[in-house]
């Protein structure tokens, strides 16, 4: 399955999970349940000292067993990572520069000088391109973003880093992990998630990224949009 349709199923699963909807007919779970990577992920998690967090009982159905809740949480962690892997620069949700996966793409000196020159030539010829266009040229000439929304340049390994980041933050929220002092999601399980998106990553790369988020208290990005919508409804 291509990453676009896989991410679409992940988004649907995340939305249903976070809004406490029925997950018994999840397309994402149906797709994964017979896959080798998912079997390996479950084996890796059950072989470690990992238990379900007791801080989030309301996100599951009352009829779910502890074993089923653990499975649903596992699926949520996988789907969150894949969704952010598909779209690491989703500026509707977060600032990718703050997350360390991108840099602000500001006009460089050459572009600024070219804009200044064009503005001078337009003025000499008394040519007017319209208020919006002229304002954008003036912004670029000053080294600012041409539009009100920022533009980012994605780092080479942004997709990999974003998947690791989301899995790290979601696993801290949904699991109690006592495999090591950092409470890290097992590296072998992360490797199998990368198998699902058909990307080869070394253990060393995964562990380097995991270390960056050992003390991170941020809200998982795949959850931020849902939480923001809940706050908006409460204030309406």
Image: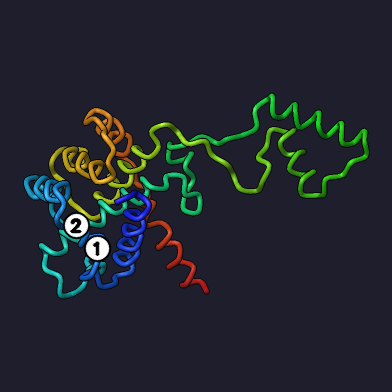
Q: Position of residue 235 (x, y in %)?
A: 50, 71
Q: Which residue is mark 1?
A: 56
Q: Is residue 178 left or right of residue 150?
A: left
Say which element carries label 1: loop
Place residue 179 in its image quadrant: top left
| 179 vs 26: above or below | above
Furthest residue toward left: 47
Q: Is residue 137 left or right of residue 39?
A: right
Labelled disc at residue 53:
2
Say which element carries label 2: loop
Q: Position of residue 90 (x, y in %)?
A: 47, 49
- Asked if labels 1 and 2 touch by Cβ distance under 8 angstroms, the answer is yes
Can residue 192 be seen in the rendering of this structure? yes
Furthest residue toward top: 110
Mark 2 and mark 1: span between their CA atoms? 7 Å
Residue at point 61% right, 34% down?
106
Of residues 150 and 5, the one nearer the viewer is 5
């Amino acid at each position: 399955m291509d990453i676009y349709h896989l991410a679409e199923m992940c988004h649907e699963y995340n939305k249903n999970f976070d809004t406490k909807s029925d997950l018994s007919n999840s397309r994402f779970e149906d797709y994964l349940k017979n896959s080798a990577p998912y079997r390996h992920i479950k084996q890796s998690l059950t072989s470690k000292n990992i238990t379900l967090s007791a801080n989030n009982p309301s996100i599951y159905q009352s009829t779910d067993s502890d074993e089923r809740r653990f499975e649903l949480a596992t699926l949520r962690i996988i789907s969150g990572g894949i969704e952010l892997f598909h779209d690491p620069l989703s500026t509707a949700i977060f600032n990718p520069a703050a997350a360390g996966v991108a840099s602000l793409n500001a006009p460089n000196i050459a572009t600024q000088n070219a804009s200044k020159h064009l503005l001078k030539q337009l003025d000499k010829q008394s040519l007017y391109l319209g208020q919006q266009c002229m304002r954008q040229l003036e912004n670029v000439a000053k080294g600012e973003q041409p539009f009100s929304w920022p533009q980012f340049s994605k780092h080479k390994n942004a997709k990999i880093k974003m998947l690791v980041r989301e899995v790290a933050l979601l696993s801290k929220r949904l699991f109690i992990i006592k495999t090591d002092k950092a409470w890290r999601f097992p590296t072998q399980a992360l490797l199998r998630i990368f198998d699902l998106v058909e990307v080869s990553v070394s253990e060393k790369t995964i562990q380097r990224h995991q270390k960056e988020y050992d003390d991170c208290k941020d809200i998982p990005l795949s959850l931020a949009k849902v939480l923001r919508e809940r706050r908006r409804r409460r204030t309406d």
